[in-house]
Image (tube, rainbow, N blue to C red):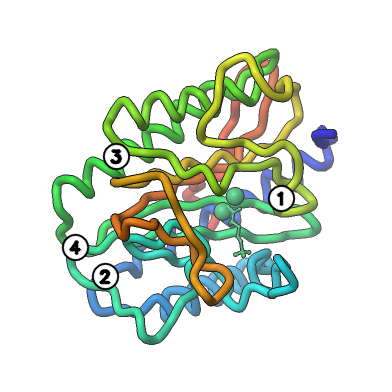
């Protein structure tokens, strides 16, 4: 069953998503050559605390492991769930995915962007542009009366049409009182399939796009997902509310939030 949020739940989602977006926008400003992914995670921790929220990542349990960081910071061939490390120094030409998930008064907001470090290659610029655009195209398909597969298919078609591949091992998801709620939102699939979209759903749509093949594996740390071929990957994510009037992005940055 896909949870339908009440007016009260939606109001709380707006707040947690506004905080998640504000933290991400601020964190992004700190990306530069020479900073470590540990430092970025610590800045994320401080920003989340400053806004009175809690990291939904820290202590998150999966396969009897607890996530040890406050945000996900994933560089180049790291797809998602990267753990900040003092040993990983960002270099000119890298790309870095920042994924911020916060809980505020019982509700969760989830959003991510991938940003260039210094000057990046044209192929990486295209990867970022296509992935961000794929997210927008997916969001546009989150229409009441449509189906989840409409979102999946639109993302896949757009990404593959530009010569990149979509990750199969990880999916978008419903989000609300839990970080991961039904439905699963794959970045591949067929239109007209999957659950029907109703008003009051809050969905985390998050294309993960690889420059090379779609295959991924998880490192020995139990978290970091990397591409098998070692080629770079990009990731963008928004939390979206479905309404009769169309999708509403809840994780847009509001200038007043921070
Ligand atoms: N933010 C991630 C998502 O988009 C989940 C974080 S996993 C954790 O679903 F391990 F970092 F918690
Ligand atoms: Co996320
Ligand atoms: Co997510």
Mark 4 and mark 3 lie on one chain; the one further toward the N terminus is 4
Residue beneath label 2, please? 32
Task: Classify mark 4: helix, strand or loop.
Answer: loop
Asked whether, in this view, residue 10 is left or right of residue 29, the answer is: right
> How many marks can you see?
4
Q: CA distance from mark 2 to mark 3?
A: 19 Å
Q: Going by the image, does 129 lie left or right of 63? A: left
Q: CA distance from mark 4 to mark 3?
A: 16 Å
**Label 3, on which residue?**
129
Spatial CA distance of label 4 from label 1 is 33 Å
Give the class, few, some or many, for how many residues have Cα within 10 Å of label 2's Cα (few <14, many ≥20): some
Cα separation between marks 4 and 2: 10 Å
Check disc 1 and report its element: helix, strand or loop: loop
Residue underneath mark 4: 93
Marks 4/1 in contact by CB < 8 Å: the verdict is no
Question: Circle 2 sits in a helix, a strand or a loop, which is it?
Answer: loop
Cα gap from disc 2 to disc 1, whole angstroms? 31 Å
Determine whether label 2 and label 3 are within 8 Å by CB: no
Left or right placement of residue 76 versus residue 27 in this view: left
Query: Disc number at residue 138?
Result: none
Position of residue 132 measured from the top left corner of the image (x, y, whole percent): 38, 39
> N-terminal of the two: label 4 or label 1?
4
- The earlier-in-sequence mark between 2 and 3 is 2
Q: Residue sitting at 38 percent across and 57 percent down?
A: 228
Examine the image and state in which quarter residue 221 appears.
Answer: bottom right
State the image coordinates of residue 58 (x, y, percent, origin top left). 65, 72
Q: Image quadrant of residue 123?
A: top left
Q: Earlier in the sequence, mark 4 or mark 2?
A: 2
């Amino acid at each position: 069953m896909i949870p339908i949020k009440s007016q009260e739940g939606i109001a709380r989602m707006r707040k947690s998503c506004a905080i998640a977006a504000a933290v991400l926008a601020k964190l992004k400003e700190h990306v530069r050559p020479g900073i470590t992914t540990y430092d970025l995670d610590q800045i994320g921790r401080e920003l989340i605390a400053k806004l009175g929220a809690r990291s939904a990542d820290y202590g998150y349990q999966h396969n009897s492991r607890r996530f040890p960081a406050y945000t996900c910071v994933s560089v180049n061939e790291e797809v998602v769930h990267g753990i900040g490390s003092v040993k990983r120094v960002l270099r000119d030409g890298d790309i870095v995915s920042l994924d911020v998930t916060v809980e505020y008064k019982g509700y969760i907001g989830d959003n991510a962007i991938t940003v260039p470090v210094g000057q990046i290659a044209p192929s990486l610029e295209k990867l970022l542009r296509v992935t961000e655009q794929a997210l927008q195209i997916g969001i546009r398909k989150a229409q009441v009366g449509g189906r989840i597969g409409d979102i999946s298919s639109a993302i896949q078609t757009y990404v593959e049409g530009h010569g990149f591949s979509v990750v199969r091992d990880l999916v978008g998801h419903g989000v609300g009182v839990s970080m991961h709620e039904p439905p699963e939102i794959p970045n591949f699939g067929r239109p007209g399939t999957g659950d029907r979209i109703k008003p009051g759903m809050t969905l985390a749509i998050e294309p993960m796009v690889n420059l090379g093949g779609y295959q991924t594996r998880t490192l020995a740390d139990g978290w970091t997902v990397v591409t098998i071929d070692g080629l770079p990957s990009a990731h963008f994510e928004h939390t979206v509310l479905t309404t009769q009037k169309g999708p509403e992005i809840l994780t847009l940055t509001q200038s007043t939030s921070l």
